[in-house]
Image: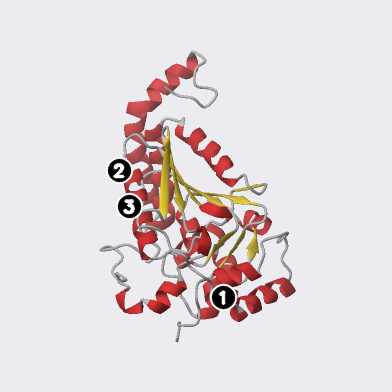
Amino acid sequence: MALKHLGTWTPFLAAFSPTKITGLSVKASLVAVKSFSAATEGEDTGKAAGQTVVSERRGSVVTVAINRPEVRNAVNQETARRLLEELEAFDSDPDLNVAVLHGKGGNFCAGYDLKELANHTASLKLEQDVTKGPGPMGPSRLELSKPLIAAVSGFAVAGGLELALLADLRVVEESAIMGVFCRRFGVPLIDGGTVRLPRLIGLSRALDLILTGRPIGAQEALAYGLANRVVPDGQALQAALQLAEQISSFPQQCVRADRSSAIYSCYDAPSFKQAMQYEIDHGIPVIQSEAVTGATSFTTGAGRGGKFS
């Protein structure tokens, strides 16, 4: 299909203000779709290379922020590359335990930058073999060994929703809007959306969102299990950081072993017995390295508030 008139998601999102979206009506959903299709191309002022993604270390927690607020944090090739670099660096850093992914300027991510897709189709390089290269949004094919939390404000749609699905937990602001908004333009989910969404909320609910492209508000996302926490507007990052610090305070070998076992059971285990075997194989080393020390601390009254040293 011709893409040269699509622009970015920005025009549609500007027409569809994220206010009081709890319990979206059919009428509201139709208005959203009509606004999307009728929108005109938005302006992308651009940013210096290396500034499309910014990170900040806070002890054993790192924040990674998409920094293209002028296009509601739509991801272009540079942004995708930087996101991949930051999350790979987090995963390999022994001093970091948890990462928080968020967007600057009041929006999480409006998906892939369709303006770039329309204007630079010939230069786009998409690796079809998922074992050999990154996804279009950057880190979507990573299998992280540590927890990632998404702090969702404003819009998390299309590829932006897929980035949120990469996270282990999603802290969502009350007025946030999620959805497969790329449905209207024939842009498929190729960053894990059709894989992760059904695992998280079930096939029936996932297909409702995938097939219709309708917007989903924070409270419905919470009821579905797509959101783990709903917080007042402007507080997603703070709440996500508090959650990250809590998780980071626990014995980390145990956290990572249990996380790995849960993910293996959900995505990779061919049978119940093999999932159980994986769990015990990864749990026994933790018993030897952390659990005995933790149990000893517990008997003396230490560590009962979630802290461990």
Image marks 1 and 3: residues in contact by CB distance under 8 Å: no
Tell me where residue 124 appears, x and y as whole percent: 32, 73
Q: Quadrant of the C terminus?
A: top left
Q: Nearer the viewer, mark 1 or mark 3?
A: 3
Residue 45 vertical position relative to residue 168 in the rendered view, above or below? below
| Residue that appears at 45% across and 69% down | 113
Q: Which residue is mark 3?
A: 85
**For residue 79, which quarter of the picture?**
bottom left
User: Whole-Å distance between the Cαs marked 3 and 2?
Assistant: 11 Å
Within 10 Å of disc 2 (Cα), the crowding (few <14, some 14-19, many 20+) is few
Amino acid at the residue labelled 2: Ser
The residue tagged with tag 1: helix, strand or loop? helix
Label 1 to label 2, Cα distance in Å? 37 Å
Q: Mark 3 near mark 2, Cβ–Cβ under 8 Å?
A: no
Q: Which mark is residue 92?
A: 2
Q: Is residue 258 left or right of residue 130?
A: right
**Residue tagged 1:** 211
- Return the disc, 1 or 2, that comes first in the chain's sequence: 2
Q: Nearer the viewer, residue 219 or 6?
A: 6
**Dot 3 crowding, Cα within 10 Å, few <14, some 14–19, many 20+:** some
Residue located at (50% from left, 82% from top): 5
Is residue 14 in sight in this rendering?
A: yes
Of all residues, the one furthest to the left in this rendering is 132
Q: Is residue 161 visible?
A: no
The relative height of residue 181 versus residue 131 in the rendered view (above or below) is below
Regarding mark 2 in the picture, which secondary structure is present there? helix
Image location (x, y in percent) of residue 296: 43, 17
